Amino acid sequence: MVDFLLQIGLLTGLTAILGYLFRHLKIPLVTAYIVIGLILGPFSQIVNPNSELISFMAELGILLITFEIGITMRLGFLRTEGLRISIIVLTELIVIIFLAYFFGLILNLSWLYTLFLILFAVNTSTSIAFKLFEESNMRNEFGDKEVKTVLGIATFEDLIAIIGIGVFTSIITLQTFTLSSVFFDISKLVLLFIGLIGVGLVMLRRLLNFLAKYGDELILLSGIAVALIFSWVANSIGLSPVLGSFIGGIVFSETKAAEYFLERAKWVREIFAFIFFASIGLRFPVNVDLNLVLIGIGVSLFIVMLKFIAFSFSIWASGFELEKAAKFSVYMVAISEFAVIITSIALGYGVVGPEMLVIAVSVMVISSILASILSSRSDVVANAVVKLIPARLRNNIENYIFRPIRMSFERRGAAFDAVKSSVRDLVLIVSFAFTVSVFFVYVLNYIVQLNLISNQVIFVIVIGAMISFYIIILLEIYATFARLFRDALRISLKGRSRSVRIPVFSIASIIVLLILSFTIFQSYFFFRESILNLIKISGISFLHLSLLLILIIVMVVFIFMTYRFLRAFRKEITGS
C-alpha cells in the first residue's frame, strides 16, 4: 500500500510539473499524462503497469469519461442528429475499407493484416477526443452542436468497433464471414442500445429526481452508481462496459441533477481520467527490437493518415466546410484501446505473434500523442488541406455532389413522416421486446441456479409474465403494421376513385390479417409446451389448481403493467 501511494504521488506530482511546461508550450495536458506514464513505467520501472489498483482506477476513469460524454450528448440531440451521425460513420467506414484494401494491395499485405488496419483505424479514442475538445476553444469557435456531432460520431464508432470485434472473432475461430451474422450483431447492438435507454429512463428517472432533492452528496453518488451499474449490465449481456456507461450518461442527462453533476463531479472524473491516460504510457513496451518499434511508428503514422482522410471526407460530405472538417479530424486521430483488445484476441487464438501487440500499443500511444500535438496546430493543418484542393473544384464538389445528397435526407412530406413514424414505433417495440427478453433469460437462468423449494411458483410467475408480455408486443406490432398500411393507402390513393380504393384496401387488409395470423400461429408453437405442461392436471391436485390460478392472476396483472410500461418507454424515447 505504501508503494502504491508513492507511485500515485510521483505520477501526480511529476505530471503537475510537466503539465506546467506543456501548458507554456501550448501542448495539451493529455500528452503530459502519457509521457509521464512512459517515464515512470517502461523507462524507469518505478510504477508497475500491471498493478490491479492502477488498472481499476484507469478503467473507472474511462467509464466516468464516457458517462460524462453521454450526459453532454443528451437524448434530444440523438433524436434529431442520430440519422445524420449514422450516415457519417458508415461513410467513414466505407472510405477506410477502400483505402486499407487499396494500400494493402500495393504493399502486398495479407488479408489478415489488412483487416487489422481497418479495425485499428475505425475507432477513435472518445475519451482523448473529449479531453482535447475540453482543453481547446473549439466549442466557442464552432458551436456546441457541431462539437456534439463529432463526439457523437466517435461514440457511434465504438458500436462499429464492438461489431468488428465480434466479426473478427468469428473469422479467426470459424474461418467464416457471413453477412447474416454481421446483420444479427448490428441489430442486437441497436436494439439493446435503444432498449436500455428507454428502460433506464422509465425505471430510474423519478428515483434520480427524488434523490436530487436531498443533497449534493446524493447527486454525486447516484451519478457514479448509474455509470457503474449500466457498465455492469452492458457487460453482462455481451456489450462493452464503455458503451454501458455511455448509455447510463444518456439516462442521467434526462434528470434534474445532470447539470449539477457535470459541474461538481469534474474533479472526480479528472483524477481517474489522469490515471487512464497515464496507463497508456505505462503499458508501452520498450524492451523490444528497435526495428519492431520503427515498424510500429510507421504503421501508426499510416493509420493516423488513414483516419484523418476518412474522417475529413465523411464529415465534409455531410455538410461541414472542408476547413472545419480538417480541423475536427485532427482531434479524432487518436486510436482507442480497441486496437489492443483486438490484437489480444488474435494473440490468444495464435493467429499473430507478440510483435503485433507491440505494434498495437505503439499505434495507440503514438496516435494519442500526435492528436494532442496536432490539435494545438489545427489551423495550420486545416489550411494545408484546403490548399491541396483548388477552390473551384472544391466549390463544385460541395454544390453539385454533397449538397444534393444532404438535401435528399432533409426532405419532408406526408408520406415520409407517416412511414418514419411507423418504422420508428416498430423499432421501439422490437427493441423493448428484445431488451426485456434478455432480462427474462437472465432471470430464468438465475432461478435455475438457486434451486429453491419455491422454484415452481417463481417459474410460473415468470412464464405468466412472459406470456402476457408477448401478447401485448404482438398486439402492438399488429397495430403498428395496420397504421402503416392505412397511412400508406390514404396517401397513395388520395384523390382516386372508389373503384381503385376498395380493392387496394381489401388486399392490404388481407395482408395485415395474414401477418397477424402468422404471428399468432408462431406464438402458439413457441409457448405450446409451457402452456400444456401448466394446464395438464391429470389427477387434479391443489398444487396444480394453485399454479393455474397464479398463472391467470399474473397474466392479468402483467398485461396491464406491460401496456403501461411500453407506453412510458415510447414516450421517454420519442419525447412525445
Image (cartoon, helix red, strand yellow):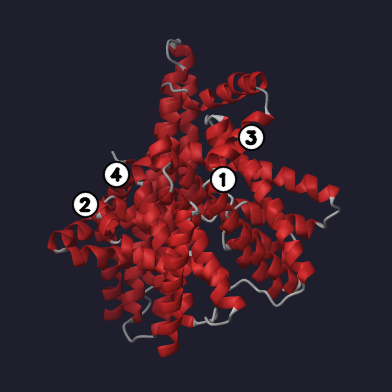
Q: Earlier in the sequence, mark 4 or mark 2?
A: 2
Q: Quadrant of residue 496?
A: top left
Neighbourhood count class around disc 1 (C-alpha, 10 Å): few under 14, some 14–19, many 20 upward: many
Q: Residue at x 47, y 60 (%)?
A: 21
Q: Are marks 2 and 3 in contact (CB under 8 Å)?
A: no
Residue type for callout 2: Lys
Residue type for callout 1: Val
Q: Are marks 2 and 1 in contact (CB under 8 Å)?
A: no
Q: Are marks 4 and 1 in contact (CB under 8 Å)?
A: no
Q: What mark, if any, has residue 256 been given in the picture? A: 2
Q: CA distance from mark 4 to mark 1?
A: 38 Å
Left or right relative to 204: residue 194: right
Q: CA distance from mark 3 to mark 1?
A: 11 Å
Judging by the rendered image, the residue that carries numbered circle 3 is 385
**In the rendered image, which quarter contains the C terminus?**
top left
Q: What mark, if any, has residue 571 been given in the picture? A: 4
82 up-or-down from 253: above or below: above
**In the rendered image, which quarter contains the N terminus?**
bottom left
Q: CA distance from mark 2 to mark 3?
A: 43 Å
Left or right relative to 245: residue 335: right
Q: How many marks?
A: 4
Left or right relative to 114: residue 417: left
Q: Earlier in the sequence, mark 2 or mark 1?
A: 2
Q: Residue at x 54, y 76 (%)?
A: 40
Judging by the rendered image, the residue that carries numbered circle 1 is 330
Task: Choose mark 4 or mark 1, whichever is in front.
Answer: 1
Residue type for callout 3: Val
Q: Relative to the observer, which residue lies in front, 424 or 30?
A: 30
Neighbourhood count class around disc 3 (C-alpha, 10 Å): few under 14, some 14–19, many 20 upward: some
Q: CA distance from mark 4 to mark 2?
A: 18 Å
Q: Residue at x 38, y 41 (%)?
A: 77
